[in-house]
Amino acid sequence: MNCNEINGLHVMSQNPTALSRIPTISKEILRVSIRYRSPLLVALLFAFATVSPGCGHPAPPGATSTEKKEPAATAPVPVPENRDADDTARFLAGMPGHPGSPFADLEQTEAWKDHRARLDSAWHNLDVTLIAGLHKFAKAELSDAALREAIVYYPFSGPDALYATACFPDNSTYVLVALEPSGTLPSLEQLSRKQDFAGYLKATRDTMGSVLGRSFFITREMDHQFRGQVTDGLLLPILEVLVRRHNTILGFRYTRLDDAGKLIDRDLSYKPRTPYGDKGLQIAYRSDEDQSVHQMYYLTINLDDEHLKTNPQFVKYAAGLKGAVTLLKATSYMTHRNEFSIIRGLILANSQAVLQDDSGIPFHFFSPDTWKVQLFGEYTRPYGSFRYLIQQDLQKAYHDPGVRPLPFRIGYGYGKVNSNLQLARRTAQTAAQNRPSN
C-alpha cells in the first residue's frame, strides 16, 4: 500500500460516517495503522472487515453499494484545518478560548468579562425557552434515518444555524442560502485596534439579539448590521452560533459557484456576476459531545424569479440537492408570492420533506397524492403585518383531528401568540422516485 492510499485512510478516519461502518476492533487497527504507516496492519484491517459480515450499518434505501454517495452539488471538499475561526468565534461568542488562544489577554479585560456574562445569561434563557423544546420535538418527530441522513437545506435562512442544527443535530451537511453577504474573518490585530472595544462587543451582541430574543433574525436589522456596520457578512454570527451549540470549528474556506453549479474555492478578490453574486462559505466543525464532523455551507443568493432566471449556476446547484430536508421559517411569506415561484418549484421538486411554519410554501401546494402533512401547534392567521395572508385551507386543516402539540414557540409573534409547524413528507411512492442518484 502506497503513501497516498494510507493518507486516504487517514482522511476516512476523520470521517465518523465512514468510520462507523467498520467494526469496533477494526477501527482500532485502522487508527494504529495510520499512526505507524503500517501496510501489514492495513491489510489485516481489510481482511478482518471482509470476513466480519453484519458489523456495519445497512446501506440506505436506494443505494447500490455499502457507501452512501452525496449529490455532487454538496460533495464535501476537505477544508484546511486552522484554529483561527474557532478562536475568534469563541471570543466573540463570550466563551473562554482553548489553550493557546491568541485572545487570552483580551479575555482579561472588564469589557470582555461583561460581554461573557451577558451572553451566558441570554443563551441560558434561550436553552430553557426554545432549545430544550426543539430538542424534544426533534427527538420525537425528526429522528428517523431518512431525515437524519439527508442534506438540511435552509433557504431564506440568514445566519440562523441554530434552528437547523437544533432540529437536525446529527445530519452531516447543512446548506444555508440568503441575501446577506457571506463575510470574512477579522484578525486579532483588526479586533485589537477597535477604539471603543466595549462598544464593539455590545454591537456584536446586538447582532445576535434577534435570534436570542425572538428565534429569528429580522431582515432590516441584518441590513443595518451585516453590511459593514458591525461585520461584513454572516460568517461571524454563524460561527458564534456553532460554538455556542457546543462545537469546535475545524476550519473554513471561501467558495463560489462555477458555471456548472459546483462549489469551488473563491479568492477574496473575486467579483461576482451580479450585485448579489454567488459568494459563499464552507465551514467544517466537530461536535464536542460525540466528535462527529459536519459541514455547513452558506451562499449569498437573491432567490426571487428575476434573479434566478439569470443565475442558472444556482438553479443547477439547488437541483443537486435532491432528497434534502428543507427548512422554511420566518420567510416574510416570500414563497406565497408569484415572484418566488422558481425557488418554490425547486423545493417541491427536490425535497423529500419540508419542515416549515405558515410563512413557508402555501398549504395547497402539498397535494395529498404526493405529500403527507403532519400539523403541529396552533394556526389561526398570520401575525402582525402579514395578517392578510391567511390560508383558509390550512386553518380548516388545523380543526381536523391529528394535530400534535408543539413544545415551544417560534417564528413571528414569538412569545406573544402560539406557533405552528408543518412537516410535509413525500408519500412512499414519490419518495422512492425522489431519492438522489448514486
Image (cartoon, rainbow, N blue to C red):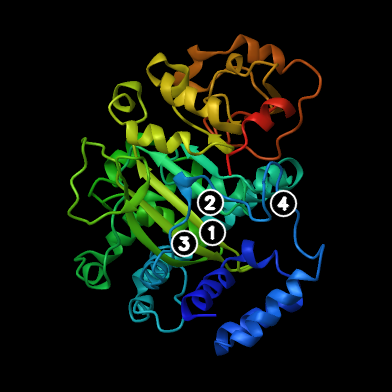
Q: Earlier in the sequence, mark 2 or mark 3?
A: 2
Instruction: Tell me which numbered mark, 2 or 1, is placed earlier along the sequence.
Output: 2
Residue at mark 3 to residue at mark 1: CA–CA distance: 6 Å
Q: Residue furthest top?
A: 392
Which comes before the other along the chain, label 3 or label 1? 3
Q: Tag on residue 173?
A: 2
- Height in image: 147 above or below 249? above
Tag 3: amino acid: Ala
Residues at discs 2 and 1 in contact (Cβ within 8 Å): yes
Near mark 3 (Cα within 10 A), the count class, few <14, some 14-19 or many ≥20, is many
Real-space CA distance between mark 3 and mark 4, rounded to the nearest whole angstrom? 25 Å
Seen in the picture, residue 165 relative to 302 is either above or below; the reply is: below
The residue carrying mark 1 is 294
Secondary structure beneath label 1 = strand
- Label 1, label 4: how many angstroms apart (C-alpha)? 20 Å
Labelled pair 3, 1 in contact (Cβ < 8 Å):
yes
User: In the depicted view, which residue is nearer to us: 2 or 100?
Assistant: 2
User: In the picture, which quadrant includes the C terminus?
Assistant: top right
| SS at mark 2 in the image | strand
Residue at image position (66%, 80%) is 43
State the residue position of label 3.
Answer: 284
Mark identifier at residue 59: 4
